[in-house]
Image: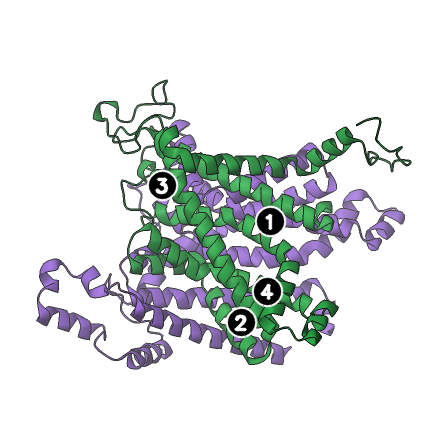
Amino acid sequence: MTAAAPVPAAPLDGWPAEGQPRAIAKRLLRRYGLALAGGAIVAAWLGVALLARHLAPYPSDAVDVVQRLAPPSRAHWLGTDALGRDVLSRVLVGSRVSLLAGFTVVLIGGLLGTLVGAVAGYAGGRIEELLMRVTDLVLCFPPIILAMAIAAALGIGVRNTIIAMLAVWWPKFARLGRSLVLVQRNQEYVEAARVVGLSPATILFRHIMPNALGPLVVLITLDMGNAIITFAGLSFLGLGVVPPTPEWGAMVAEGRELVEQWWVAAFPGVAILSVVMAFNFMGDGFRDWLDPRSRAQ
Amino acid sequence: MVLYLVRRVGSAVLMTALATVMVFLIANQVPGDPVLAQLGDLAASDPAFVAEFRALHHLDRPLPERYWIFLEGLVHGDLGMSIATQRPVLDDIVQYAPATVELATAAFVLSLAIGIPLGVLAAVRRDSWIDHVARALSLVGVSSPTFWLAFVVLAVFYGGLQIAPGPGRLDPSALAPPTVTGLFVIDSVVARDWETLGAALAHLVLPSLVLAAATLGLITRTTRAAVLDSLGQDYVRTARAKGLTEWAVVIRHALRNAWIPIVTLGGLAYANLLTGAVMTETVFSWPGLGRYTFRSAVAVDFPAILGITLLVAVVYVAINLIIDLSYALLDPRVLRS
């Protein structure tokens, strides 16, 4: 490999010459190291969510009254809660609901919002006016209050809370989707596609959207942490899961009076923090990759 | 300028009106029933009692008429009766707002007082340790769930180290200062009650830090990016070339031109602090609007939710207006165009 490496041109100062694998790896690692670490953490949590039942040392709802509120020990690495349930097991199993809620809200909300925005941006005129007015209307509300009201009205449960979050989640994607389509709409390739006689739907979804995908991926990744925090928050307030189900926000709520037994509330929070930070690292990495100018900041 | 103001306020009023219509529609499409949420099982099984309750809150009227009743009341400064507390919504809001305003203002002051200098330092000493610390802090601030952060600081500083007072605006046994503004810090100064002032300030430290965390992170990031951006401009090179000290360059030239993004973010952040205090108020037993909103939402108390929606809309509109007006002060070019 080294023998085959081309003779490098005079390297710019500070920049390793092209074609030196180790130097390139070092540069990539320096620039995208955090993003890679974020990706690894997210992947690890996804693995945990899939295999939770097998990884958890105890059943997540196994009550052990003798061992209640036991501090972290070799038997219970993260201690036990007020009912003597193993905190580690509940944190591991709890990842399922949190990640599922985060992914569902951002993916479905992102899809719906982008669709609304893209159609508005491409159609223009009255359709655009109508769709964007509705979008602005929903954006008028502080999302958490609106989601709280809808979730409370629909009744407690994971599905209802996700529906409530979806109701407030799509508008920001509608704004982004519209602005992305507006940028592309007057490009020559769109004109060409129109001249050839393709239908508006084909032009929008087969030609414009693939070109606008980058910023969407960035927002979706950065937003994932946001959605996970919001869901955990609603759950903390008692609007997320029905009690015995382990979920991170609800676990913090169960332990919030227990200042002496800090491990009950602290560890589920660390889990949330780690996932959210990992998604933020990934999102920043995507952004740097797609938009080299943002790197300077 | 006047025309611009009129247009802005006009469209804001229209949006607010549409927002209340939307809450009305949502309120009547959802399965939750305020009657069942409020009355006990026994009362709810008595048709006469239920009918009386519905009539009292106009729940028996058709939807457009109920909306008209609401608008009519609004003109007279009446937001209607809360179904849950059986008090006028306006009275409830007036009672709970000061605690939230005090908390949000403290958090806002903290995030500006720490965030702006930290952001400037991070930009000037780019890639130094202070830059890394600032970035790490803002990352943790943005990524932590507020309700968890609140628990952690309470556990550490109140439960563990015992150097901070517990939840609440004052100790349970302490008397609130005589009400003038409802803000304990100001009221205790008015009453020359220095002991209460100290206690009120001490009780503010932890919750306002927690509430400020996310905002602090955002303000630090934005300040850093804005100052870095203007440090690369020609006028900064000119200022340096004419021999100004580095700090004069940074403060008088670079920071001055970085104000617009900071003010934009800061204004919106204040609005978010005012409305987003639900979690912090819950963990710190803070008797503010956040908890009132939460209770109203859970009780499906639509008059209260409607009143809060209206208040929030007004706050957002007012703050957006202030932001736009302050552009004119910060950048004389805005007025000319």
Measured from the top left, where is residue B152 in percent x and y? 42, 35
Q: Quadrant of the C terminus of chain B?
A: bottom right
Q: Secondary structure at mark 4?
A: helix
- The residue tagged 3 is A247
Q: Amino acid at mark 4?
A: Phe
Measured from the top left, where is residue B29 in percent x and y? 31, 69
Q: Amino acid at mark 1?
A: Ile
Measured from the top left, where is residue B301 in percent x and y? 28, 63
Judge left or right: residue A194 versus residue A281.
right
Q: Secondary structure at mark 1?
A: helix
- The residue tagged 2 is A132
Q: Which chain is green?
A: A
- Quadrant in which residue A192 is drawn: bottom right
- The residue tagged 4 is A205
Q: CA distance from mark 4 to mark 2?
A: 20 Å
Q: Is B317 in front, or is B20?
A: B20
Q: Is A215 in front, or is B336?
A: A215
- The residue tagged 1 is B219
Whichever of callouts 3 and 2 sits on the residue coming sooner in the sequence is: 2
Q: Chain of mark 2?
A: A
Q: Which chain is purple?
A: B
Judge left or right: residue A94 versus residue A275.
left
Q: Amino acid at mark 2?
A: Met
